[in-house]
Image (spheres, rainbow, N blue to C red):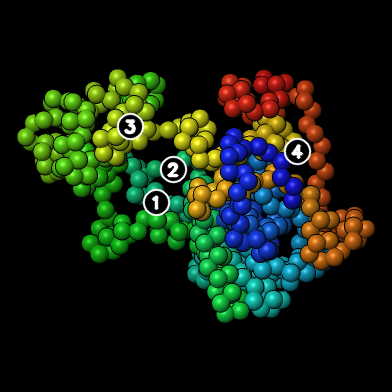
Amino acid sequence: MEFQGRLYQTSGMARRRYLPLRGIRVLSFEVAFSLPAGTRTLAELGAEVVRVAGPARGGGPYIGVIDGVYLSKECIGINLKHKDGIAVARALVAEADVVCMNFTPRAMAGLGLTPPDLMAIKPDLVVLQLSGYGTPGPWSEYPAFGPSTEAAGGLNAAMGNESDEPVRIGSGVFSDQLAGRFAALAVVAALERRRASGEGSVVDLSMTEAISTLLGGQVVRAAMEGRLPPRPGDRDETYAPQGVYPCAGIDEWVAITVKTDAVWAIFVQATGIELLTADRFATSAGRQGCHDEIDAIIRGWTAVRDKNDVARILQEAGVAAGPVRKEGDAFFDDHLRKNEAFQEIPHEQRVAGYGAHEYLRLPWTIEGRPRALLSDYRWTGADNARVLKRWLKIPASKVRKLEKDGALLHEAVRPLDGRAPVPGIPVDQDFALRLGLPLNREATG
């Protein structure tokens, strides 16, 4: 795969990149978000990831380009309802180290591609099956999306204030991202087992269990005490004060947590708020009983200050505090820029009015070595000829015949009309100019 893009800091470009999975082949029957998030992580660790795409199901460019979970993968389009398509898929399985899927078990059984089917083709294979609820069990065949598994895993019931109804996090991809990262971890563990023993593995991963695992102590506590833990909203049963406080500007906030009485003394000194020196506030128990009063005083101090200034003052003093950043704030974060967290990738087609987008990369590095470079989303079947030649030695002429016969799928990609706006998605021209992104100016509306 050829990389095209740019980094905003290139001081580390000459260093050797950390690609521990180089040489590992991953074939992924993936849709939507959860598994693609995991296999993108594998790709960033150096694995050769090939995404198997079927007939268009809608939302591809959005998920592939805006969310970025299809980045850094090649794409082969296979019609799994065609006998020759199934034959190609099974031949690819025989050349893979890892096969992943996030269709329901029933769907894979109908294709003859269940984990036992795959292990029969290649016994030392690592097979990962990701689903909403896991197998076996009465819910194993239920379709699922992030929001439904977040609810089933207990996350919604743990959020919000006690007097309010349960709430959700954002766009509904929280469960997907979490399960995807667990999937990548499971694959790495199974590959290490194979390296040590020569044995393959079948990994079954439940998105719902991932959410319940995230809740951890709350689940255990509910079982031990026979009651649901309270939903404290922004507050904590131990730390006081804890909350999110308004700052100067429109919809600007800062999060503050005071863990101990010693930190409280530091907080009072750092803020210089005379009203907080009262003896009744000196202990955690006392502050818990006066939390509303304390919050009102703190709000008066934060409301006239910039959220970043508040966070800096408190952090420098040793108090846990952080500005509540909106999603777009990350793009202009000097700390993230310094750590080369972003990479700009130009697109084959303009998407949402832009000729490129920036993407966050792996949120960690090893011994200061540069992260892997991302590459652009690949449209359905864009790599049919390349993958089949490299994996199966199939010549281009036979690939074209398989495409003509309908066994392979190939989506023709034509440049968008630069004079026409991209339907349905407005473009923030100021945002693009601040980032220096190539902009389809005719699409700004």
Q: Position of residue 251 (x, y in %)?
A: 39, 25
CA separation in Å, label 3 and label 1: 28 Å
Q: Residues within 10 Å of mark 3 (few under 14, many from 20)?
A: many
Name the N-terminal-most of marks 1 and 2: 1
**Circle 2: residue type:** Ile
Asked if the residue under mark 2 is in contact with the one under mark 1, i.e. CB atoms within 8 Å, the reply is yes
Q: Nearer the viewer, mark 3 or mark 1?
A: 3
Residue 12, how many percent across, how many down? 58, 43
Q: In the rendered structure, are the residues bearing label 1 and label 4 in contact, judged by CB atoms less than 8 Å apart?
A: no
Distance (Cα) linking label 1 and label 4? 38 Å
Q: Which residue is mark 2?
A: 169
**Image-quadrant location for residue 127:** bottom right
Residue at disc 3, secondary structure: helix
Q: Which residue is mark 3?
A: 311
Q: What residue is disc 1 on?
A: 155
Amino acid, disc 3: Ala
Q: Residues within 10 Å of mark 4 (few under 14, many from 20)?
A: some
Q: Residue at x 87, y 64 (%)?
A: 394
Q: Give the image quarter of residue 25.
A: bottom right
Q: 50 or 60, which lies in front?
A: 50
Q: Nearer the viewer, mark 4 or mark 2?
A: 4
Q: Earlier in the sequence, mark 3 or mark 4?
A: 3
The disc labelled 4 sits on which kind of residue? Glu
Q: Nearer the viewer, residue 95 or 219?
A: 95
Q: Which residue is mark 4?
A: 348
- Which is more N-terminal, label 1 or label 3? 1
Which picture quadrant has residue 123?
A: bottom right
Q: Residue at x 67, y 20 (%)?
A: 445
